[in-house]
Image: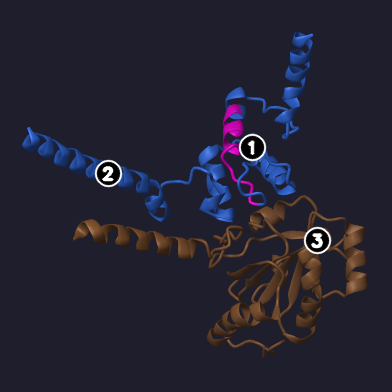
């Protein structure tokens, strides 16, 4: 009985992520790149969803457009430029590294450095303290 | 001394970030098109699908391009004001009917009035993608040099017209004189 229920769930699970009704692109390498890219393009209608997960009409249009560009031989860099020229850096979940996004990409490193410096200071103070206590 | 001052400084900086960040509208995505040449297009005319309308029709003119659809509540909200602008502002308004039903769109203009010089039909949404459209209604201001001067996302209101559109139109007209503008309220 349990195995039948599991089987049903397993069969149904396919449809949970089948938002893009189109068949895969002919070239498996290109298709993998396409699948990867649509997971990293923001749907601007429902901003915390990638277009791969969104059923918004705009997401479908963007998928169709990206697919068409891949079919015409464009590659990821070109398609990213196409999207950014129209929707801005915000459209990519992984924005490109450029002066505008330096702060965004650099902030974690800067914060890590500050955290490390504070940590080192505290450690040193404690070591000194324990030495004087001894 | 620093031990006491530092948290205050950090808190103030964070506070400033929050003050700014929380007052921004997260749904607003600034358009990268501002200051760039407006995308070109040529599409069937809503009222006469056998002929076309496009960017070539307003070369050298200051115009508005309004993206609308009958499924968009904000478009209905701003429609009476667009009609008013078309009658009084002196700025031609072109429409872009975005992924809509042609019959419904024609009926809409029939009953609510038609503020547009002409409406282009973008049934597939391809031209809308070129313009970076994501939430109708959107209104673009296009200068005489064919560049996008401004984009407004949300229904057009008298306040927006006066504060955002008129100064930009006036600045453009100072460089190259254009038809007199009236302040529509």
Q: Are marks 2 and 1 in contact (CB under 8 Å)?
A: no
Task: In the rendered view, tell whether residue B38 sits above or below residue B184.
Answer: above
Stretch in magenta: A32-44
In the displayed image of the protein, which residue is found farthest to the front?
Answer: A133
The residue that disc 2 covers is A113
Q: Are marks 2 and 1 on the same chain?
A: yes
* Residue B34 locus on image (x, y percent): 55, 66
Marks 3/1: CA distance?
A: 30 Å
Q: Which chain is blue?
A: A
Q: Secondary structure at mark 1?
A: loop
Question: Can residue B53 be seen in the rendering of this structure?
Answer: no
Give the residue at x 74% y 74%: B93
- Between residue B90 and residue B37, name the one nearer to us: B90
The residue that disc 3 covers is B69
Task: Answer with the quarter of the image where residue B142 lies.
Answer: bottom right
**Nearer the viewer's eye, disc 3 or disc 2?**
2
* Residue B163 locus on image (x, y percent): 60, 81
Chain B in the picture: what colour? brown
Marks 3/2: CA distance?
A: 51 Å
Position of B145 with respect to A26 (left or right) is: left
Marks 2/1: CA distance?
A: 45 Å
């Amino acid at each position: 009985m349990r195995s039948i229920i599991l089987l049903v769930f397993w069969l149904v699970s396919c449809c949970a992520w089948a938002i893009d009704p189109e068949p895969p692109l002919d070239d498996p390498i290109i298709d993998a790149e396409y699948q990867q890219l649509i997971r990293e393009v923001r749907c601007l209608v429902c901003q915390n969803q990638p277009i791969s997960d969104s059923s918004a009409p705009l997401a479908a249009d963007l998928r169709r457009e990206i697919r068409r560009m891949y079919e015409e031989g464009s590659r990821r860099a070109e398609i990213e430029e196409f999207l950014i020229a129209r929707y801005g850096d915000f459209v990519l979940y992984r924005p490109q590294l450029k002066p505008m996004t330096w702060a965004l990409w650099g902030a974690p490193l800067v914060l890590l450095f500050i955290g490390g410096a504070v940590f080192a200071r505290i450690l040193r103070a404690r070591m000194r303290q324990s030495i004087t206590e001894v | 001394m620093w031990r006491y001052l530092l948290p205050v400084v950090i808190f103030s900086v964070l506070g400033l970030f929050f003050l700014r960040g929380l007052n921004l509208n997260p749904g607003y995505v600034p358009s990268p098109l501002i200051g760039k040449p407006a995308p070109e297009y040529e599409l069937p005319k809503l009222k006469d699908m056998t002929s076309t309308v496009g960017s070539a029709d307003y070369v050298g003119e200051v115009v508005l391009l309004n993206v609308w659809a009958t499924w968009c509540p904000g478009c209905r909200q701003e429609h009476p004001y667009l009609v008013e602008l078309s009658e009084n502002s002196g700025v031609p308004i072109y429409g872009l009917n975005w992924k809509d039903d042609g019959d419904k769109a024609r009926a809409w203009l029939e009953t609510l009035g038609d503020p547009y010089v002409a409406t282009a039909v973008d049934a597939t949404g391809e031209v809308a993608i070129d313009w970076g459209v994501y939430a109708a209604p959107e209104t673009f201001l296009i200068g005489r040099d064919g560049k996008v001067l401004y984009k407004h996302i949300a229904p057009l209101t008298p306040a927006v017209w006066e504060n955002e559109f008129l100064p930009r139109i006036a600045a453009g007209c100072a460089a190259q004189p254009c038809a007199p503008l009236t302040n529509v309220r």
